[in-house]
Amino acid sequence: MKKIKIPLLYLLSLFFSVGPVLIYFFANIDRYVQTAPQGVKVTCGFALLFVIAFLKVIGKLKIPSRIYVFAIVFLLSYLLKDVLKDLIVFSMLALIGELLDSVCQIFIKRAKENALIDKTAQKSAMEIKQIFSGRV
């Protein structure tokens, strides 16, 4: 159970980060994908948004310059322009998701620290056992 605790916390963190927005989106999907091209654009936009959120959650999102930030914002705005009508609701849900994610990150940090403490304790116990058994 200890080995899967941290990956499960990462999945929970990812769900908290994007879950509220996705739940609202799927509850109102008929408003956003009235035509096939709208559906394709919205799908691509949410796929890109999901990838960015996933990279952020696992700590791998390193954006080197503002050009990339504005390019991502432009691309997301273009792909999700039909969804942006509900920007206030989506931004509130994203804020709630980030707040829940920050709480989850605390638990991830503690779980990592506990795993490191356990690993160090086991290694120390093995070294002490070897010392007392005369194998040093």
Image (cartoon, rainbow, N blue to C red):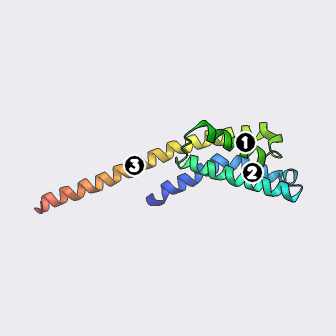
- The image quarter in which residue 98 lies: top right
Q: CA distance from mark 2 to mark 3?
A: 33 Å
**Residue furthest out toward the front:** 67
The three-letter amino acid code for the residue at tag 2 is Ile
Judge the density around disc 2: few (<14), some (14-19), many (≥20) Cα neighbours within 10 Å: few
Quadrant position of the C terminus in the picture: bottom left
Going from N to C along the chain, the mark reached first, 1 or 3, is 1
Q: CA distance from mark 1 to mark 3?
A: 42 Å
For image coordinates 73% across by 51% down, the residue present is: 45
Residue tagged 2: 23
Going from N to C along the chain, the mark reached first, 1 or 2, is 2
Q: Is residue 42 left or right of residue 124?
A: right
Residue tagged 3: 114
Residue tagged 1: 74
For image coordinates 65% across by 43% down, the residue present is: 97
Which is more foreground, mark 2 or mark 3?
A: 2
Q: Nearer the viewer, residue 118 or 74?
A: 74
- The image quarter in which residue 95 lies: top right
The three-letter amino acid code for the residue at tag 3 is Asn
Q: Find numbered disc 3 in the image and state the secondary structure of the residue it sits on.
A: helix
The three-letter amino acid code for the residue at tag 1 is Phe
User: How far from the left and from the top, in percent, is residue 124?
Assistant: 24, 53
Judge the density around disc 1: few (<14), some (14-19), many (≥20) Cα neighbours within 10 Å: few
**Residue furthest out toward the left:** 134
Q: Find numbered disc 2 in the image and state the secondary structure of the residue it sits on.
A: helix
**Residue furthest out toward the right:** 34
For image coordinates 78% across by 50% down, the residue present is: 25
Q: Find numbered disc 1 in the image and state the secondary structure of the residue it sits on.
A: helix
Q: Is residue 52 above or below residue 40?
A: above
Q: Is residue 25 left or right of residue 69?
A: right
Going from N to C along the chain, the mark reached first, 2 or 3, is 2
